[in-house]
Image (cartoon, rainbow, N blue to C red):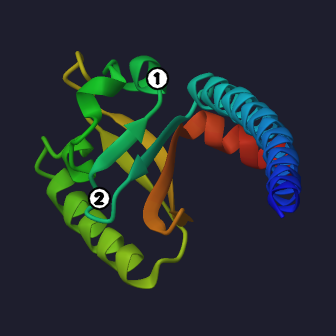
Amino acid sequence: FTMGIALTLANRFIQAHNRAEDLNIDLERGVKELRRANSEMSRSEQKYRILVDGSNEIVFTLNTELTITRINSATMRLLNMRPEQLIGVPFLEMLDAGRQDQNVESDLLREKLRGFIGSRKTTSFRMRFKHGIRADSRELMVRLEFIEVEGVREIQGRAASLIEDSLLKFLGS
């Protein structure tokens, strides 16, 4: 009787050991797949950063309150402002409303942005941006569109100089 119990226990221990080995093999496979996916994601993220930061256009993201959450380094070339200076800044504060005739332009832009927020349809417009050093402003063509990333709604934007924007449209047609 004791021998039977010992054999049964030994058999169960062997089965548990084999199951543990199988689980270890599955775990090792899963870890390898996770490392490969992380590596691939890092490469993809690095390519994205190079693409966005290397762009001649200002590429930015706004939250639904129209505050800048991300922006690329093209701001240095086009507006003479560092990207980190602009994170957290309301988008409309980028508007150069220094001259009297621009107050009407400012009001029209605010109305356009309210319509964009309400309709969630892609929109494009010209906007005079403040310049970091010079007293004058820089007019850029802006394009805004709503995107959803992992359940979070954001606004993706691009701002290009009017010459570059015209060239892109000409080459694209």
- Residue found farthest to the bottom: 119
- Residue 44 falls in image quadrant: top right
In the rendered image, which quarter is residue 118 located in?
A: bottom left
Q: Which mark is on residue 66?
A: 2
Q: Residue at x 32, y 65 (%)?
A: 64
**Where 80 falls versus 30 (above or below)?**
above
Q: Are marks 2 and 1 in contact (CB under 8 Å)?
A: no
Q: Residue 111 location in percent, x, y? A: 27, 74
Q: Which one is in front, 73 or 171?
A: 73
**Amino acid on which disc 1 is placed:** Ser
Tag 1 secondary structure: loop
Looking at the rendering, in which quadrant would you find the N terminus?
bottom right
Q: Residue furthest front?
A: 1
| In this picture, residue 25 sits left or right of residue 104 | right
Assess disc 2: are there few (<14), some (14-19) or many (≥20) residues with their C-alpha within 10 Å of its C-alpha: some
Relative to 53, residue 167 above or below: below
Name which residue lies at 73% across and 28% down. 39
Q: Is residue 80 left or right of residue 26?
A: left
Which numbered dot is residue 73?
A: 1
For label 1, count other residues whose C-alpha is less than 10 Å away and answer few (under 14), some (14-19) or many (20+).
many
Disc 2 marks which amino acid?
Leu
Is residue 3 shown above or below 21?
below
Q: Which mark is residue 156?
A: none
Q: Looking at the image, which is closer to me, 85 or 20?
A: 20
